[in-house]
Image: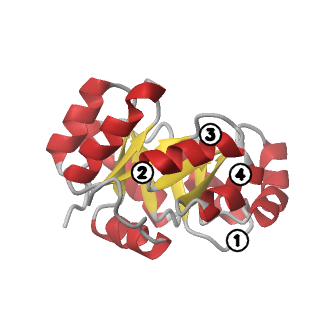
């Protein structure tokens, strides 16, 4: 897949997760190298030099992977720039950008930071207003505890944050997460098929 290839549909993204539910969340060039060598199918680029993102995305695509890029700026121009670079999906906590991301041809992932009970109470409203393709719950390690208290958002869930062991990963997947975003290389090959 090259940077000019058509963007993958949400269904294709979810099919990758069924085979290998742990996604690499890379914070550095060294982690990117580990991720590309690991065989992980989905790579989240969480930090990096904006001027170098184009070549990074091309490398990820050339390795046969999907890339998901954390939002650069909370405005439509930032989304358009990432889409032109070839990002397959864009993650942001700004719900108002979900329609813009989808119009750009990328998968729209809404990040929900649930650091207190009031965030959970307002999450359903935010999700229904934003209409994301996928939701990422942070911290993901709380998902098993929150699952019975959370509304059904009607879209697939990712869980990220503080998931460091296979037991953590299994608990989160049993709680209903379609996938996990993690910077722990020991989990990137979990359930690889």
For the residues bearing labels 1 and 3, Cβ distance under 8 angstroms: no
Secondary structure of the residue carrying tag 4 is helix
Residue 93 seen in the figure: no
Secondary structure of the residue carrying tag 2 is loop
For the residues bearing labels 3 and 2, Cβ distance under 8 angstroms: no
Q: CA distance from mark 3 to mark 4?
A: 10 Å
For the residues bearing labels 1 and 2, Cβ distance under 8 angstroms: no
Q: Earlier in the sequence, mark 1 or mark 4?
A: 4
Mark 1 is surrounded, within 10 Å at the Cα level, by few (under 14), some (14 to 19) or many (20 or more) other residues, namely few
Image quarter (top left, top right, bottom left or bottom right) of the N terminus: bottom left
Mark 4 is surrounded, within 10 Å at the Cα level, by few (under 14), some (14 to 19) or many (20 or more) other residues, namely many
Q: Residue at x 58, y 41 (%)?
A: 139
Which one is closest to the eye, mark 1 or mark 3?
A: 3
Residue 53 seen in the figure: yes
Q: CA distance from mark 1 to mark 3?
A: 30 Å
For the residues bearing labels 3 and 4, Cβ distance under 8 angstroms: no
For the residues bearing labels 1 and 4, Cβ distance under 8 angstroms: no
The answer to which of 172 and 78 lies nearer the viewer is 78
Mark 3 is surrounded, within 10 Å at the Cα level, by few (under 14), some (14 to 19) or many (20 or more) other residues, namely some
Q: CA distance from mark 1 to mark 2?
A: 31 Å
Which label is found at residue 86?
2
Q: Earlier in the sequence, mark 3 or mark 4?
A: 3
Please give left or right for residue 167 compared with residue 63 in the image.
right
Q: Residue under circle 1?
A: 152
Q: Residue under circle 3?
A: 78
Please state the horizontal and vertical placement of residue 70, each as a whole percent of the image: 53, 40
Q: Residue under circle 4?
A: 97
Q: Residue at x 52, y 67 (%)?
A: 176
- Compared to 42, does 57 lie above or below? above
Mark 2 is surrounded, within 10 Å at the Cα level, by few (under 14), some (14 to 19) or many (20 or more) other residues, namely many
């Amino acid at each position: 897949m090259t940077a000019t290839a058509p963007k993958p549909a949400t269904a294709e993204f979810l099919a990758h997760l069924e085979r290998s539910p742990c996604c690499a969340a890379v914070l550095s060039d060294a982690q990117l190298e580990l991720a590309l060598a690991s065989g992980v199918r989905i790579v989240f680029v969480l930090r990096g030099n904006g001027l170098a993102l184009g070549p990074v995305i091309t490398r990820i695509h050339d390795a046969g992977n999907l890339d998901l890029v954390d939002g650069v700026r909370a405005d439509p121009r930032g989304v358009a720039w990432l889409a032109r670079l070839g990002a397959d999906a864009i993650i942001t906590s700004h719900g108002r950008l979900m329609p813009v991301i989808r119009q750009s041809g990328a998968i729209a992932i809404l990040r929900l930071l649930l650091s207190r009970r009031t965030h959970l109470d307002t999450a359903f409203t935010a999700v229904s207003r934003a209409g994301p393709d996928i939701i990422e719950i942070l911290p993901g390690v709380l998902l098993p505890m929150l699952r019975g208290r959370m509304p059904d958002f009607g879209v697939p869930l990712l869980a990220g944050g503080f998931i460091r062991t296979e037991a953590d990963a299994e608990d989160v997947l049993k709680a209903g997460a379609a996938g996990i975003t993690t910077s722990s290389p020991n989990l990137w090959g979990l359930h690889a098929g």
